[in-house]
Amino acid sequence: MPVIESTYKPAFPFKNGFVSTVYSGLVRRVPLKQERERITLSDGDFLDLDWSFSEEKTSKLIILLHGLEGNGQRPYMTGAAKLFNKNNVDAVCMNFRGCSGEDNLKFSSYHSGATSDLDAVIQHAVQSKNYTEIYLKGISLGANIILKYLGERDAVPTQVKASVAVSVPCYLAGSAKELHAFKNKLYHDRFLKHLVEKLKLKRERFSDLLPEEDLKSIKTLSDFDSVYTAKAHGFKSAQHYYETSSSLQFLPHIITPTLIINALNDSFMSPECYPVKEAKNNANLYLEMPKFGGHAGFVGRKNVYYNEQRALEFIKSIH
């Protein structure tokens, strides 16, 4: 599909990518009543799911996936859930392993290309909850997982009708390089601090798998991916992880109607993260590149974000 012309025009302060990103991550609040459910996975680990519901009974569900070190209570999750609930769609915010406030049971946890847990949640929604129309929406790392999930398999469950990927680093090596640049030092250091703190907890239970000297050697996000992500999840190296987990290579194979929204002033994105060629060559892929928005910072009116409104419009348009 041709690239979609974006209509996003934020208020003046939020034309600055840094301001919109930081405001959205640290200032925005969207209270939402949620009910937590824990499901057991096939490998014996668990996932915590945070549900919120439409006022009327519905067979429609949106599954929401967060970004790196996010959770089901982040405003970009509750904001989308609240909007869809108001439009007769139930919502479930999927907490990745170790992100729900309690460490998961395994040494491994989650990463940008781990799609099996999303598949488990979809199967749970279909088989245990009887939803007949399922939509997927992800932010950042969660968006990459969705795109990879849709493009890597021969068949997607027929209940999955549409997906939306926002601020998606679909070329992980490029985004990793951008995150290590000086312009992103504040973000880089914040992510790294959270990840290392959680890894210290893991080491208390898995000291044999993570020597103290390895933990101390982590100075950058790339180090983290080398020391932990790659080794814990069966990759040869951080680079191998980036190559195999990037969703960019799977975009040509997506047959589920999918909207990608990546802001042109997102400092986490490399040029490869704007898949114009892939969108033009795939009738099921819609690419929107707003001039503004930063990283998941599409500030809108009345605390409804532009990307959330667009997700709702896009999903409605599919029917």
Image (tube, rainbow, N blue to C red):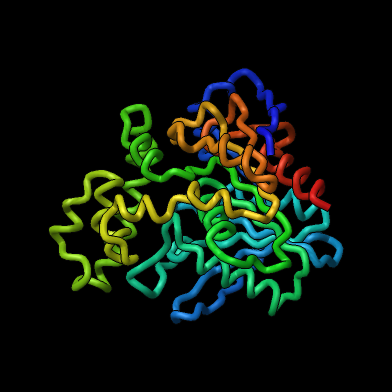
Find residue 297 and report its image quarter: top right
Q: Residue at x 68, y 34 (%)?
A: 2
Above or below 212: residue 219: above
Task: Depth check: give the residue in front, 160 or 139.
Answer: 160
Asked whether residue 163 is in view, the answer is yes
- Identify the residue shown where x is 36% and y is 37%: 179
User: 33 and 316: which one is in front?
Assistant: 316
Q: Is residue 123 above or below residue 265?
A: below
Give the image location of residue 271, x and y in percent.
45, 31
Q: Nearer the viewer, residue 77 or 115?
A: 115
In the rendered image, the quadrant that contains the N terminus is top right
177 relative to 276 in the view: left or right: left
Left or right? Give the position of 238 relative to 34.
left
- Which x, y percent locates residue 295? 52, 36
Name the residue located 54 percent from the left edge and 28 percent from the top edge: 264
Q: Residue 112, located in which quarter of the rendered image? A: bottom left
Residue 73 in sight: no
Give the x, y percent position of residue 128.
Answer: 69, 79
The residue lying toward the viewer, choosing from 197 and 93, is 93
Q: Position of residue 46 (x, y in %)?
A: 49, 75
